[in-house]
Amino acid sequence: MPIRERPERPNDTAETAALQALGFVAGDADRLARFMALAGVSVDELKARAGDPAFLGGVLDFVLEDEALLLEFCAASGLKPASVARLRADLPGAPVWE
């Protein structure tokens, strides 16, 4: 089995997963409204910040904080829950566990 190399910029993969998560959240009006309320952003702010790695980390935090939502996202994206958690660590603002 060939060994997969990590991308030169691991954040590329994390950002891609977070953008997928944002699209998933935006695909349901209730989920999107809840996310926007918790994040304290308007639609215009959400659009403006969609490319910000720190904001995208917050999107993954939102998904990771709700197991049912995480499992739905994983089913839709093909990612595993543990992968989502690992990818979150590649974006700014990730919790540090000591």
Image (cartoon, rainbow, N blue to C red):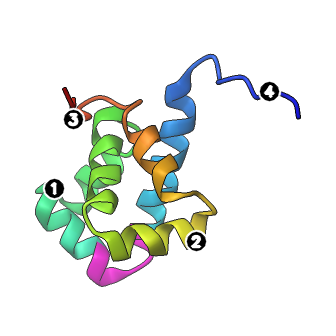
Q: CA distance from mark 3 to mark 2?
A: 25 Å
Labels 4 and 1: the sequence-earlier one: 4
- Reading the image, the residue beneath label 1 is 39
Query: Quick one: label 4, few (<14), some, or many (20+) residues within 10 Å?
Result: few
User: For the residue labelled by badge 4, is the local secondary structure a helix, a strand or a loop?
Assistant: loop
Checking the image for residue 95, the label placed there is: 3
Quarter of the image with the C terminus is: top left
**Amino acid identity at mark 4:** Ile
User: For the residue labelled by badge 2, is the local secondary structure a helix, a strand or a loop?
Assistant: helix
Regarding residue 73, the answer to whether it shows in the image is yes
**Which of the 4 image quadrants contains residue 40?**
bottom left
**Amino acid identity at mark 3:** Pro
CB-based contact (under 8 Å), mark 3 and mark 2 = no
Q: Is residue 78 above or below residue 87?
A: below
Labels 2 and 4: the sequence-earlier one: 4
Checking the image for residue 76, the label placed there is: 2
Residue drawn where x is 26% and y is 62% of the image? 43
**Amino acid identity at mark 2:** Ala
